[in-house]
Structures are given as structure tokens and as C-alpha cells.
Amino acid sequence: MHKELITFTENIVKNLVKEPDMVSVQEFLGDDDIVLLEIIVHDSDMGAVIGRGGKIAGAIRTMVQAYGYIHNLKRIRINIDSF
């Protein structure tokens, strides 16, 4: 488990949404040392997390991957979903 990575990602997303208590970030290990992060937000906050044209989601991915690079994590994939 990469608790620092999860906390970092949660802090970014919680500052973007109207319902931060509904944000959940879970980690799954994939093949070949791939870390898969699943970000789940409330349905009403999906627009704020994705952004126009996916720009916010792209920025989140960039920041999380940069954090992973600094901490020697090979590959990080991020999925964003709602409930």
C-alpha cells in the first residue's frame, strides 16, 4: 500500500469537490508494478473533477504521476468514477 500516494490524491480531489466526505481513493496493484488508483466521487461532483475537455482530470493525473515519479513508483494509472 502506498498510503502517502492515496492521501496526496485525496487531498487534491477533496479540494475540488462540493462534497469532500464522499471522495474515496482506493489502490489496486496491477501487472508489472502498475499502481491503479480508483477515485470515486459523488455524481454531482463529476464535472468538477473531470473539467471542461478533461483538463482537470489530466492535471490530477499529471500531479499524481509526478508524485509517483519522485517516490520511485514506476507506473500509475488513474480511473475516475462516480456513485
Image (tube, rainbow, N blue to C red):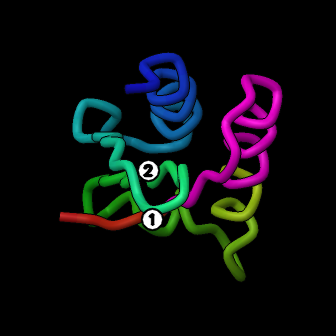
Q: Is residue 82 left or right of residue 12?
A: left
Q: Position of residue 80 (x, y in %)?
A: 43, 64
Name the image quarter holding the N terminus: top left
Where 5 falls versus 80 (above or below)?
above
User: Could you tell me which residue is drawn at 58 percent across and 33 percent down?
Assistant: 12
Left or right, 13 with respect to 81, comes to right
Task: Answer whether residue 71 is magenta in the image.
Answer: yes
Query: The magenta stretch spans which residues?
Result: 61-78
Residue at screen point 54% across, 58% down: 32
Identify residue type, mark 2.
Answer: Leu
Q: Which residue is mark 2?
A: 37
Outermost residue to the bottom: 53
Where residue 7 appears, as percent x and y from the top left, is 47, 21
The percent position of residue 70, horizontal first and vertical second, equals 82, 26
Residue 82 sits in quarter: bottom left
Q: CA distance from mark 2 to mark 1?
A: 6 Å
Amino acid under label 1?
Asn
Local packing at callout 1 (Cα closer than 10 Å; few below 14, some 14-19, many 20+) is few
Look at the numbered discs 2 and 1 and tell me whether their residues touch, using CB distance below 8 Å: yes
Residue at the extreme front of the image, as rendered: 32
Pinpoint residue 44: horizontal percent, then vertical percent: 31, 63
Circle on res. 65: none
Q: Which residue is mark 1?
A: 79
Callout 1 secondary element: strand
